[in-house]
Amino acid sequence: MKITSKERARLRAMANDMQPVFQIGKGGLTPVITDELDSVLEARELIKISVLETCAQDARELCETLSERLRAEPVQCIGRKFVIYRRSREGKHIELD
């Protein structure tokens, strides 16, 4: 699934007011975190994740890795936060023009 630049811009605007739903710390990206994020993406489609300073990986690297593992699209990565999006398998919840 690839999203257009127009869709990405709309998703970024939606994510501006969102608070991070997960924090990745010094343990890095574990299978447990990946599984939990997979479940959350089914329910919310668009999530913001925060990367703590104690994490050995930077936010951009984690964003790319998670996007691949979860079959999601990276939307935005700024500083220690990033946003990913995956259309729900059960039906479209976020209407994109």
Image (cartoon, grey):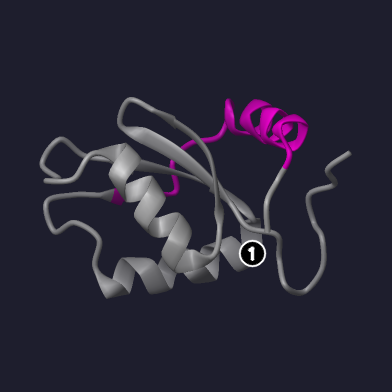
- Going by the numbered disc 1, the residue's amino acid type is Ala
- Which of the 4 image quadrants contains residue 66? bottom left
Q: Is residue 92 above or below residue 96?
A: below
In this view, the residue in front, 88 or 18, is 88
Q: Is residue 54 above or below residue 31?
A: above
- Which of the 4 image quadrants contains residue 35? bottom left
Q: Residue at x 82, y 60 (%)?
A: 92
Q: Residue at x 78, y 49 (%)?
A: 94
Q: Is residue 91 above or below residue 13?
A: below
Q: Is residue 18 above or below residue 74?
A: above
Residue 69, given in percent of the width and then of the height, sits at 43, 67
Residue position marked by numbered label 1 in the rendering = 43
Left or right, 56 with reference to 29: left
Residue 51, given in percent of the width and then of the height, sits at 27, 41
Q: Which residues are magenta?
A: 4-23
Left or right, 70 with reference to 24: right
Residue 82, given in percent of the width and then of the height, sits at 43, 38
